[in-house]
């Protein structure tokens, strides 16, 4: 163990899955909480995956990570969340052939409702939770609603992979390094209705629409490419995004716990307090900035009619999802 810090407890669910296999090693190496922060990994899986999880834990041991102060492997939710300072809800039931979106929502609701209750009961008082398992906005909403004693601001769903995807596509189009592209907000649902907003994004401090003259591409093809990128990766790789998703998990947590660089923002789905007319209580993708303790939705961004139309479509989808799971949340 290095440094004088007490270890923090980090729970990862679905830890034996594909994303888990990319994520755990990066957390244990210090990329999420910094080079001085020891970590205990609490790994939650379903019973049939416990053997495979033990293999992953053996590999973590074999890395001899100085920051990895311990591991707890369990298939019991309350044990998994015991004392957790951070919870990464990655595990979810996959969509099977012939399954409707509403079936997937119901199956996952039966996972995320009880997990929300267990987090409220056993996690640390400062717990913060990032939901990755899909459909992540609504899974997050279900878990959050089942943990009414926890502040709603502690819950996040992941839209960072979409942000990163947009950043690279814009950088390629403008022929600039990715680091030059900033201020990307992904609005709404992490689904094919999401709206990755290039109009408020910047390249080396200049509006993207001033640097890239092909506005048709920015308003059309770019948006479509990001909306469908997950499916394109599945088609090419034969499996869904995993390493890039794990990378986005790291980025999400870092940008919640560290102050956002001045003038920039990142994408996170957070509870709506009515910003930009989004109904209160939806877990909605917004551009967000953090001071390291608290976050806020970036105010006063301008949208044209096309952007507002897209934001309305993704809002409607989230409202429909909310309606489909109303039996899974306390009224
Ligand atoms: P895998 O199927 O490889 O792994 C999921 C793991 O979760 C499995 O090991 C399974 O046993 C476990 N699990 C299922 N129910 C559980 C429960 N109740 N408690 C604990 N563990 C449970 O999927 P993987 O590729 O790792 O993806 C995980 C989730 O991330 C999926 O729902 C996927 O759709 C979602 N994604 C979300 C992304 C985002 O940007 N928000 C992008 C990547 C990814 O598609």
Image (tube, rainbow, N blue to C red):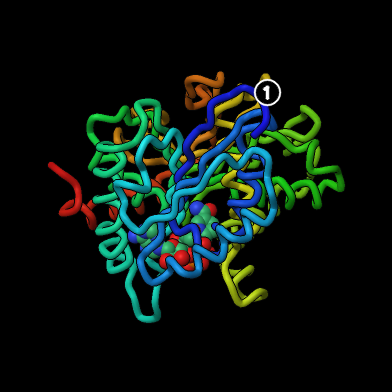
Relative to the observer, which residue lies in front, 112 or 199? 112
Quadrant, the N terminus: top right
Say how many tags the image has.
Answer: 1
Find disc 1 in the rendering and name its residue.
Answer: 261
Q: Does residue 49 sit above or below 224 in this rendering?
A: below
Relative to the observer, which residue lies in front, 323 or 26? 26
Left or right: where does residue 185 sit relative to residue 127? right
Left or right: where does residue 296 sit relative to residue 164? left
Location of residue 275 in the rendering, given as x and y in whole percent from the top left corner: 40, 28
Which residue: 81% across, 31% down?
204
> Which residue sits furthest bottom?
98
Res. 309 visible in picture: no
Where disc 1 sits, the SS reads: loop
Location of residue 17 in the rendering, given as x and y in whole percent from the top left corner: 51, 64
Relative to the observer, which residue lies in front, 277 or 20? 20
Quadrant, the C terminus: top left
Q: Does residue 119 sit above or below 291 in this rendering?
A: below
Which residue: 75% across, 38% down?
181
Residue 258 lies in what quarter of the image? top right
Location of residue 60 in the rendering, given as x and y in whole percent from the top left corner: 62, 54
Location of residue 136 in the rendering, given as x and y in whole percent from the top left corner: 42, 52
Relative to the observer, which residue lies in front, 114 or 313? 114
> Which residue sits furthest left?
331
Q: Does residue 200 sit above or below 245 in this rendering?
A: above
Residue 185 lies in what quarter of the image? top right
Sort mark 1 into few (<14), some (14-19) or many (20+) by Cα contacts within 10 Å: few
């Amino acid at each position: 163990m290095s440094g004088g810090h007490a270890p923090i407890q980090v729970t990862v669910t679905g830890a034996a899955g594909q994303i888990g296999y990319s994520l755990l090693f990066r957390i244990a190496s210090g990329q999420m909480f910094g080079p001085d922060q020891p970590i205990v990994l609490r790994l939650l899986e379903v019973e049939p995956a416990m053997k495979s999880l033990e293999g992953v834990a053996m590999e973590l041991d074999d890395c001899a990570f100085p920051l990895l102060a311990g591991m707890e492997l369990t298939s019991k939710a309350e044990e998994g969340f015991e004392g957790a300072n951070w919870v990464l809800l990655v595990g979810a039931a996959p969509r099977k052939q012939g399954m409707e979106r509403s079936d997937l929502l119901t199956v996952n609701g039966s996972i995320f409702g009880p997990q929300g209750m267990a987090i409220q009961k056993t996690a640390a008082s400062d717990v913060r939770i990032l939901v990755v398992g899909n459909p992540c906005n609504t899974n997050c909403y279900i878990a959050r609603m089942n943990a009414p004693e926890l502040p709603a601001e502690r819950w996040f769903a992941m839209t960072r992979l979409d942000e990163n995807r947009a950043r690279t596509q814009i950088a390629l189009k403008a022929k600039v390094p990715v680091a030059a592209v900033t201020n990307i907000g992904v609005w709404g649902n992490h689904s094919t209705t999401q709206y990755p907003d290039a109009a408020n994004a910047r390249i080396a401090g200049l509006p993207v629409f001033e640097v890239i003259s092909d506005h048709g591409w920015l308003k059309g093809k770019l948006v479509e490419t990001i909306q469908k990128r997950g499916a394109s990766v599945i088609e090419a790789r034969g499996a869904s995004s995993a390493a890039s998703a794990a990378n986005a998990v790291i980025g999400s947590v870092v940008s919640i716990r560290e102050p956002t660089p001045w003038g920039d923002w990142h994408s996170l789905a957070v509870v709506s307090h009515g910003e930009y007319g989004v109904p209160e209580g939806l877990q909605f993708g917004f551009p967000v900035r953090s001071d390291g303790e608290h976050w806020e939705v970036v105010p006063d961004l301008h949208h044209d009619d096309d952007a507002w139309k897209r934001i309305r479509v993704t809002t409607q989808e989230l409202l429909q999802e909310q309606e489909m799971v109303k039996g899974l949340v306390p009224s």
